[in-house]
Image: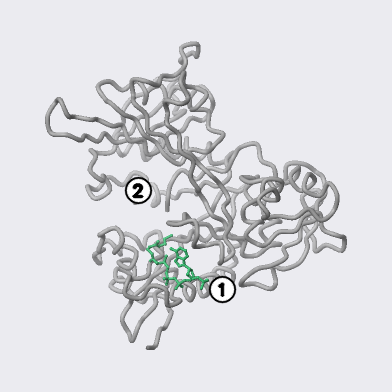
Amino acid sequence: MAFRVRTVRDHDELSTALSAIGHYFGWYPTKEDAERFSRLLPLERMHAVLDDGRIVAGAGVFPFRLTVPGGDMACAGVTVVGVLPSHRRRGLLRRMMDVQLADVRERGEPIAALWASEETIYGRFGYGLASTSFNFDAERSSVAIRSDLPRDASLRLVAHDEALKALPRVYDRVAKRTPGMIVRSRDWWESRRLDDRPEQRRGAGPLVRALAERDGRPVGYALYRLAQDGSTPETWTKTVRVNEAFGVDDGATRDVWRFLLEIDWVDRISGSHLPLDHPLPLLVDRINKLRLSVWDALWLRVVDVPAALAGRAYGSPGRATIEVASDPHFPENVGSWTIEDGHVRPARRRPDVRVAVSGLGSAFLGGLSFAQLARAGLAEEVARGGIERADELFRTSAAPWCPEIF
Ligand SMILES: CC(C)(COP(=O)(O)OP(=O)(O)OC[C@H]1O[C@@H](n2cnc3c(N)ncnc32)[C@H](O)[C@@H]1OP(=O)(O)O)[C@@H](O)C(=O)NCCC(=O)NCCS
């Protein structure tokens, strides 16, 4: 049986390649779906595996920029990875990952990132868990914002066009100080975040857009849907499903969440992908009633070690030397690099810390410390005090936060 990996040639092929992952959602994209998709994922970024000329697997890349400490960086946003069940465990994912990563490196994207369907899959391809997040699912009546906290922003519901203008202004301000966020284009807002076609609703109502303002200026927003289960008033359970909620500062964040928690006549409120340092658990009066659960979030692959290290800022002017001891794809990434005063050079000294390339991916956005990785056997201190020196540099003031699965 002859398998061949290549990029798709047209929208028909794109829709077939997308239906490999679509199979697992009961989604069989049309040519029109593929055309819409290709506004964000160009044909040349979608690989497919052909079995005797028939597409049986696909893997794509959104070529976006991701915020990193001190700025943003070209990133391969790996997505729509799927192999039809008829072809599982015959090495098709591996073939696609090999070709895709080589292509990413050739294009000069220093990092790749993804959300994993299962945590067991991507470590072997050099990805490391780079951020964790929490979800919550609470009874609305048992959580409220603490009564000692003031109110200073007001919220109103806005239509799509106004949201498209105002929300990016808020998001961009938050993204600037938060690693791990996608730099969203207008296309991204339109065809993903504000997309309200019925198939996006998953049993809930239309998208509600609430804008928070202070002195007439946008300072926050929430995107949510109301979902109703049950067919009679006695069995109704109404849930506010929060897609995304941001404030540009502490007061705005608090008031956006207060707005959401005060919506009348609902039974539950749920939200997801919040970073572990998010204030919500401390803003409410009863943290346990939020019923928090912790999840893996972004996985990151450092594709070009020196370029990636040089492309982020560091928390202190100190010096640390990192050894990347192994990389399953790129021997060029194996070696030691010294970071000093924000500059990166090949090292001539003994390393402070030794990691596999996946360990560097975990530490890259500041989401996991080298100390934490070492405690789990995922990093090794080579020189005395080396872990502390490396952590001094890599530490960030905000935990990485990617608010959306892509
Ligand atoms: C996950 C999926 C893409 C794997 O594809 P595949 O072609 O069967 O994978 P391969 O045969 O290339 O396997 C490569 C390696 O990954 C391992 N692997 C594959 N899927 C795995 C899984 N779900 N959990 C753990 N290991 C897995 C294989 O055992 C193999 O291990 P090895 O390196 O020791 O040989 C496929 O099962 C699938 O489409 N699943 C449903 C959709 C999905 O989860 N997509 C990923 C979205 S992020």
Q: How far across and down, in percent of the image, does residue 122 sit?
A: 52, 62
For disc 2, does the CB lie below 8 Å from ligand 1?
A: no
Q: How far across and down, in percent of the image, does residue 24 sit?
A: 31, 61
The residue lying furthest to the top in this view is 148
Q: Residue at x 26, y 63 (%)?
A: 29
Q: Give the quadrant of residue 354.
A: bottom right
Marks 2, 1: nearer the viewer: 1
Way the structure is coloured: one colour
The residue lying furthest to the left in this view is 232
The three-letter code of the residue at mark 2 reads: Glu
Left or right: residue 17 compared with residue 231: right
Q: Choose between 386 and 204: the one closer to the eye.
A: 386
53 w.r.t. 380: above or below: below
Task: Identify the residue position indicated by label 2 in the image.
Answer: 190
Alpha carbons under labels 2 and 1: distance apart: 31 Å
Residue 292 has which mark?
none
The three-letter code of the residue at mark 1 reads: Ala
Residue 102 has which mark?
1
The quarter of the image that holds ligand 1 is bottom left
For the residue labelled by badge 1, is the local secondary structure a helix, a strand or a loop? helix
Tell me the quadrant of the picture where the N terminus can be found: bottom left
